[in-house]
C-alpha cells in the first residue's frame, strides 16, 4: 500500500469514527421513536386506544402537526424565527429554563408552575428542526400559555412594540393587509390597532392566511401532555 | 510523508530554472485563481453590506423598516449575510489559495483549468440562488445551512469537482514527499464533501427525527470550522511563514501531532450546543470535551510557528503577508480558546451571542486574516504588478485587526452577560434581551466602522490590482524598510520571481 493510501485511510478513520458514533448510531436509535397513541377509559374503566370508528387513532403523544399548523411551521422557518427563538427547555440540572415563569404560564391558569424539559418525542410533532439558533427572544416551547387570545398574538406579530415598547422583535406587517371596510362593518378578525399604527378611518387591518397559519402553529405550542418517557408517574397522577 | 524532508523547505533563493518554473506555474494558475479570488472578494463586499444591515436590524428593527422591505427583517437578512460570508467569501478565497499553494508545492503546471472554472460558476450560481432564496423566503432553520433545499446538490457537485482536481494535482506532484500544507489541503478536500453530504442528507432527504436534524446542523457548523476552515487557514500559514522567513518549519514532529489531533478531535465537536437538551447526554459531553481537546493543536502549532519565526519577528513589521498571517495564527489560538470556553460554560453561553462571537473569531479573526495575508502574497505573482500603496495595506490591517479582536471579544463578553441574565429564573426575557442589546449596539458600531472601512479599502486595492494599476516593479510593497540585521536573508514578500 502506498503512503497516500495510508494517509487517506487515516483521514477516513479519524473522521469516520466520530461521524459514526455521533450521528449515525444516535439517528438509528432515535428512528425507533414514534408518536404514542393516547389511551382513553371505556365504560368498563378499561384503558383502550381512542379510535374514530374507522380504525384511525384519534390522538397521539405528541399531538401531530397537520394542515394549517404545518403551513404555520413553514412560515416560522422561512421568516427565520429560529434565528432568535428556541424551542428547547433544558434539564433543570443544567439550566434554569424550566423555572422561567415567562416561558411557561402568564395567562393560562392551567399552565404548570414549572415547565418540564422537552424530550426527543416532543419534536416528532413538527416537520422541521426548530430547536433554535440563539435566544434573543424567549423560548417558544410553551408560548401558547403566554397569550390569552389569538388577537393578542396577532398584535405581537404585527408589531411587538405595541405590548412591549423595548422589544427588539421585528414587525411582520407584511403578513397583514389593510383593506377598506365593507358594508357590514369591520371584520371580526380586524386587529385592534390604536395610535400611530391605526389604519385610516374606513380601513381595517386583517391577517392574511399566512398570519393565521402562523398563529395556528404557535397557539398549538404547549407541552400540556404528559411526558411519555415517565408513564408510571403520569398514571399515578391520573388515578 | 514520513521523512524529515517533508517539512516545508522552500528556499527563496534559487537557480534561474527555479524562478522560471515558478513563474510558469503561476501563469498556469492565473485563470482559476483570479476567478475564485474575484468572486470571493465580490461576495465579501456583498456580505459585509448585508452584515451591516443584519447587525443594525438586530437591535433596532425600525431601521429600513418599510412594508415593502419586509424581506430585510433580521430573521432573513442574518442568514443571508452569514451564508454569503461563508459560502461566497470564505469558501471561494480558501479554494483560490488552496489551488495556488497546491500547484506551487506540487511543482506542476495547471493543465486544464476548464473544470475549475465550470465548477466555480456552478458554485457562484448556487450561492447566488441560495442568498436570494433566503431573502425571498425559502430559508431553513439551521445555522450555516439556511440555503433553500435545492441549492445543496449544486454546491456539492461543484465542490467535489474542485476537490477531485486538487487530489489529482497532488498525485502528479514532482516530489514523492508531501509538505505539511499539502496534508491540510488534501484533508480539507477529503472531509468537506463528506461533512456536507451527511448534513444535507440527514436534513433534506432521509426521514430523520427532528432532534437529530438539529444535532446534524450543530455538528455541521462545528465540523465546517474545525475540519475545513482550520485546515485551509493552517495550510496557508504553513506555506507563508517558512516562505517569508526563509527557513523550514521548526519541528516536523509537532506538525504531525497538531495535524492528527485536529483530524482526530475535530469531528467530535458541535453537539455541546444542546447541553442539557433532548440529545443523549453522553453525546453532548463528548462534544464538549472534544472542543476542549482542540487546545492541544493550539499549543503544538503555536510553538511550531513561534520557533519558525524566532529571531525574525522584526519581519512582521515589514511584510504584509507575514503580519496578516501571524495575526491569523493568533486568531487560531483564540478560536480554539473561545471554543473551549464556550464548551466549559456551555450551560450559560449556549444560545447566546457568545456563539456569534465564536463564529466571527473563527471566520474573520482567524480565517479571513490568514486569507488576506495569502492574497497579499499571491496576487502580485499572478497579475504581474505590485500592490500600489503601503498606506492602503496598513489601513486594511489596523481596522481589521481592531475590528476582529473587538468583535470577537465583545460578543463573547456580551454572550456571558446575556447567558447570566437568561439564567436568572425570576427575571424577564425582555431584560435579558436588553442586556444583550447594549452589546449588539457595540457590535454594530464595530461593523460599520472598523470592518466596513477596512474592507472597503481592501476591495478598492484589490480592484486596482485586478486592473493592473499596481506598481510596475520587482520590489515588493513592504510596510517599511527592513533594517540591516535582516539583510542576511532575502525578504521574499512580493517580487514576481520569488
Image: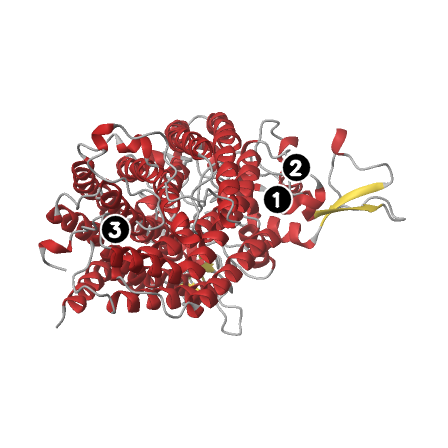
Q: Is residue B412 above or below residue B155?
A: above
Residue at 13% x, 46% y is B254
Q: Which residue is mark 1?
A: B72
In the shown orientation, is residue B167 left or right of residue A136?
A: left
Q: Is residue B347 above or below residue B467?
A: above
In primary-sequence order, the first of circles 1 and 2 is: 2
Percent position of residue A33, x then y = 35, 62
In primary-sequence order, the first of circles 2 and 3 is: 2
Q: Are marks 2 and 3 on the same chain?
A: yes
| Foreground pick, B267 / A91 | B267
Q: Chain of mark 2?
A: B
The total number of labels drawn is 3
In the shown orientation, is residue B466 left or right of residue B190?
A: right
Q: Chain of mark 3?
A: B
Report crowding for label 3: few under 14, some 14 to 19, many 20 or more residues within 10 A (C-alpha).
many
Label disc, if present, on residue B64 of the rendered structure: 2
Q: Are marks 1 and 2 in contact (CB under 8 Å)?
A: yes
Q: Which residue is mark 3?
A: B266
Screen quadrant of the N terminus of chain B = bottom left
Question: Do we see residue A46 in this rendering?
Answer: no
Residue at 40% x, 40% y is B364
Q: Are marks 1 and 2 on the same chain?
A: yes
| Foreground pick, A101 / B271 | B271
In primary-sequence order, the first of circles 1 and 3 is: 1
Question: Do we see residue B459 in this rendering?
Answer: yes
Structural distance between the alpha carbons of marks 2 and 3: 40 Å
Percent position of residue B395, x then y = 46, 31
Structural distance between the alpha carbons of marks 1 and 3: 35 Å
Q: Are marks 1 and 3 on the same chain?
A: yes
User: What is the residue that sits farthest to the right in this orientation?
Assistant: A183
Amino acid at each position: 500500500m502506498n503512503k497516500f493510501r495510508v494517509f487517506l485511510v487515516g483521514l477516513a478513520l479519524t473522521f469516520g469514527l466520530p461521524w459514526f458514533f455521533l450521528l449515525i448510531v444516535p439517528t438509528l436509535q432515535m428512528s425507533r421513536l414514534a408518536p404514542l397513541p393516547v389511551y382513553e377509559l371505556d365504560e368498563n374503566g378499561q384503558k383502550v386506544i381512542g379510535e374514530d370508528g374507522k380504525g384511525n387513532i384519534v390522538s397521539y403523544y405528541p399531538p401531530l402537526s397537520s394542515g394549517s399548523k404545518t403551513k404555520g411551521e413553514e412560515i416560522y422557518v422561512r421568516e427565520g424565527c429560529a434565528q432568535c427563538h428556541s424551542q428547547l427547555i433544558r434539564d433543570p440540572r443544567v439550566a434554569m429554563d424550566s423555572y422561567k415563569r415567562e416561558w411557561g404560564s402568564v395567562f393560562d391558569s392551567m399552565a404548570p408552575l414549572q415547565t418540564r424539559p422537552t424530550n426527543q418525542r416532543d419534536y416528532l410533532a413538527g416537520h422541521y428542526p426548530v430547536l433554535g439558533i440563539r435566544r434573543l427572544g424567549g423560548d417558544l416551547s410553551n408560548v401558547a400559555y403566554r397569550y390569552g387570545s389569538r388577537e393578542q398574538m396577532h398584535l405581537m406579530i404585527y408589531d411587538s412594540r405595541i405590548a412591549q415598547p423595548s422589544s427588539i422583535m421585528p414587525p411582520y406587517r407584511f403578513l397583514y393587509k389593510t383593506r377598506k371596510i365593507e358594508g357590514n362593518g369591520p371584520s371580526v378578525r380586524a386587529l385592534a390597532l390604536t395610535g400611530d399604527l391605526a389604519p385610516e378611518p374606513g380601513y381595517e387591518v386583517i391577517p392574511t392566511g399566512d398570519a393565521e397559519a402562523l398563529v395556528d402553529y404557535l397557539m398549538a405550542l404547549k407541552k400540556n401532555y404528559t411526558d411519555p418517557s415517565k408513564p408510571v408517574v403520569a398514571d399515578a397522577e391520573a388515578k | 510523508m514520513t521523512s524529515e524532508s517533508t517539512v516545508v523547505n522552500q528556499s527563496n533563493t534559487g537557480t534561474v530554472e527555479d524562478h522560471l518554473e515558478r513563474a510558469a506555474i503561476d501563469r498556469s494558475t492565473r485563470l482559476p485563481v483570479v476567478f475564485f479570488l474575484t468572486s470571493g472578494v465580490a461576495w465579501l463586499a456583498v456580505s459585509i453590506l448585508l452584515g451591516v444591515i443584519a447587525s443594525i436590524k438586530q437591535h433596532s428593527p425600525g431601521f429600513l423598516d418599510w412594508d415593502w422591505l419586509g424581506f430585510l427583517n433580521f430573521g432573513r437578512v442574518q442568514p443571508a449575510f452569514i451564508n454569503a460570508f461563508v459560502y461566497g467569501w470564505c469558501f471561494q478565497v480558501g479554494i483560490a489559495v488552496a489551488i495556488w499553494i497546491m500547484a506551487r508545492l506540487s511543482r506542476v503546471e495547471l493543465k486544464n483549468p476548464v473544470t475549475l472554472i465550470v465548477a466555480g460558476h456552478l458554485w457562484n450560481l448556487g450561492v447566488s440562488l441560495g442568498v436570494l432564496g433566503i431573502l425571498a423566503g425559502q430559508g431553513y432553520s439551521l445555522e450555516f445551512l439556511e440555503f433553500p433545499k435545492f441549492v445543496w446538490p449544486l454546491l456539492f457537485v461543484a465542490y467535489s469537482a474542485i476537490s477531485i482536481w486538487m487530489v489529482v494535482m497532488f498525485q502528479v506532484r514532482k516530489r514523492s514527499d508531501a509538505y505539511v500544507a499539502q496534508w491540510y489541503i488534501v484533508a480539507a478536500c477529503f472531509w468537506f464533501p463528506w461533512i456536507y453530504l451527511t448534513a444535507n442528507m440527514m436534513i433534506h432527504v432521509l426521514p430523520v427525527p427532528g432532534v437529530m436534524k438539529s444535532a446534524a446542523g450543530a455538528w455541521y457548523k462545528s465540523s465546517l470550522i474545525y475540519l475545513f476552515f482550520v485546515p485551509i487557514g493552517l495550510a496557508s500559514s504553513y506555506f507563508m511563514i517558512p516562505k517569508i522567513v526563509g527557513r523550514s518549519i521548526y519541528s516536523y514532529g509537532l506538525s504531525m501531532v497538531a495535524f492528527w489531533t485536529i483530524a482526530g478531535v475535530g469531528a467530535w465537536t458541535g453537539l455541546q450546543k444542546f447541553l442539557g437538551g433532548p440529545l443523549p447526554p453522553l453525546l453532548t459531553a463528548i462534544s464538549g470535551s472534544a472542543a476542549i481537546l482542540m487546545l492541544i493543536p493550539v499549543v503544538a502549532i503555536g510553538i511550531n510557528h513561534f520557533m519558525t519565526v524566532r529571531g525574525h519577528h522584526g519581519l512582521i513589521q515589514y511584510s504584509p503577508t507575514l503580519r496578516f498571517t501571524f495575526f491569523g495564527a493568533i486568531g487560531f489560538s483564540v478560536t480554539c480558546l473561545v471554543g473551549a470556553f464556550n464548551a466549559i460554560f456551555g450551560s450559560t453561553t449556549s444560545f447566546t451571542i457568545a456563539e456569534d462571537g465564536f463564529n466571527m473569531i473563527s471566520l474573520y479573526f482567524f480565517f479571513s486574516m490568514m486569507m488576506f495575508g495569502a492574497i497579499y502574497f499571491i496576487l502580485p505573482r499572478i497579475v504581474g504588478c505590485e500592490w500600489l500603496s503601503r498606506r492602503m495595506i496598513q489601513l486594511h490591517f489596523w481596522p481589521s485587526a481592531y475590528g476582529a479582536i473587538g468583535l470577537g471579544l465583545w460578543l463573547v463578553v456580551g454572550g456571558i452577560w446575556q447567558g447570566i441574565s437568561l439564567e436568572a429564573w425570576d427575571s424577564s426575557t425582555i431584560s435579558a434581551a436588553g442586556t444583550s442589546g447594549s452589546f449588539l449596539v457595540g457590535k454594530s458600531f464595530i461593523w460599520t466602522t472598523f470592518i466596513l472601512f477596512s474592507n472597503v479599502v481592501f476591495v478598492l486595492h484589490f480592484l486596482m490590482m485586478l486592473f493592473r494599476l499596481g506598481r510596475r516593479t520587482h520590489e515588493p510593497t513592504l510596510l517599511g524598510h527592513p533594517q540591516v540585521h535582516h539583510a542576511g536573508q532575502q525578504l521574499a514578500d512580493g517580487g514576481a520571481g520569488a
